[in-house]
Amino acid sequence: MSIRRQLTFWLLTSVLAAGLIASLVVFFQARNEANGLFDYQLRQIAIALRDRTFLPGQLDEVLKGEDAREVVVQVWGPDGARIYTSDAKAAAPMVIKLGFDDLQAASGHWRVFGIQQRGLTFQVAQPMAVRDDLALAAAWRTLLPFLVALPLMGLLIWRLVGHEFRPLEATAQAVARRNPNSLSPIDAARVPEEVRPLIASLNGLLSRLGEAFAWQRQFVADAAHELRTPLTALRLQLQLAERATTDQQRNEAYGALREGIGRSAHLIEQLLALARMDPGTPMGELASVDLGDLAAGVVHDQQVVAAARSIVLEAVGTEQVVVAGDATGLRMLVDNLVGNALKHSPEAGRVSVGVSREEGGARLVVEDQGPGIAPEERERVFDRFYRGEGAAEGGSGLGLAIVLRVAERHGGKVELADAAVGTGLRAIVTLPFRESEP
């Protein structure tokens, strides 16, 4: 599909249609004017004939010149017998009519005018084809300039449209010459105003792609850096296990190796979870999620971990609050908050999880009795791989980053505050109510 060809075709078609319409209008106007003019001519000829004396030797001398070819004069005597016709070959109508009338004869359609004088009936007839020929000639003279101008207009339109499309072609070539790393905005200074919204949308897309690529490059670099240490540790632990000379040494080495594998597996799971939270990755279909039931399920699943350290993990005041969101992502959010709280809480401590409804949204609160986070560090702990001074051993530094990413994808926010009583940290997540997709 070529815009240039389509514009040329439709513009030329419109010009031709306008010419045809104008020709039709001219045809009907010319025919109406010709009818009036020729009717006057017929009447004048008939009036002029009524004063003539028709002698046998003068019957062929009544009408001469052009009038003899355009009109046919017939004269009938008092007895109704035709005594004169100016053109017997014309096959004019033989019907006697007074005044103006339209008659049909074997030779075609005729316009007639008849009068009576001194017992004679004079009738002047004219073929309607004469009038139509005159109107068609006028219409053709109107249409001819359009037909002559069509090729010139087509060439002119083709050249003008091509000239106006040159900035677009230059822009397309500039985009085609780019490599995957060239994501700078497209210059829209010379493009037509109608195309600027498209260029602006493309620039917006390039900007988002640049941010996504930058996020991915940073993520890959951080992931490579973070995986290097545990993989080196695993390699060393495996070497220690291979060099062990006693069963006790071998069991201790294998135990350390299992713990290292567990930490590496957890780190990889967190990395994959964070990758799924990529800003450029669209969120799946929204579903109705009961945040209270989800939090109660996480508390139930984490009871084994809490019991191993004699920590009291309980759901406090969890009510039924339904939000629209990604159930997997929200589960990941609550899992990370509760997991972090259990890691940082002392043995025989207490971790509480609460869900409540507030104006315009849902509120999730996870509170522990750990050392907490200093106010000046509460913004930085959401950065990937950041571990504060009081971070638990073996953490990946990704838990709160995942929590923040999930909350932001759901239009919510995360706040960190001091525990309500004693030491500890209070993590507060607020999520707005949104309608789920069908």
Image (cartoon, rainbow, N blue to C red):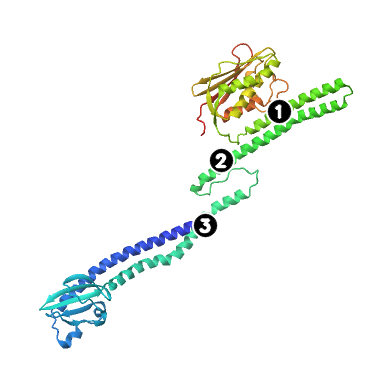
Distance between mark 1 and mark 2 Cα atoms: 34 Å
Residue position marked by numbered label 1 in the rendering: 267
Distance between mark 3 and mark 1 Cα atoms: 58 Å
Whether the residues at callouts 3 and 1 have beta carbons within 8 Å, the answer is no
Task: Write the residue at 64% across / 35% down.
Answer: 215
Q: Taking 118 as reference, is 332 above or below it?
A: above
Q: Which quadrant of the view contains residue 337?
A: top right
Whether the residues at callouts 3 and 2 have beta carbons within 8 Å, the answer is no
Residue position marked by numbered label 3 in the rendering: 162
Task: Write the residue at 38% across / 63% down.
Answer: 19
Q: Taking 249 as reference, is 154 above or below it?
A: below
Residue 429 visible in the shown view: no
Question: Which residue type carries mark 2?
Answer: Gly
The kind of secondary structure element at disc 2 is helix
Residue position marked by numbered label 2 in the rendering: 204
Find residue 26 and report its horizontal and vertical position in percent: 32, 65
In the image, farthest residue toward the right:
245
Closer to us: 305 or 236: 305
The kind of secondary structure element at disc 3 is helix
Whether the residues at callouts 1 and 2 have beta carbons within 8 Å, the answer is no
Residue 384 disc label: none
Find residue 318 and report its horizontal and vertical position in percent: 56, 18
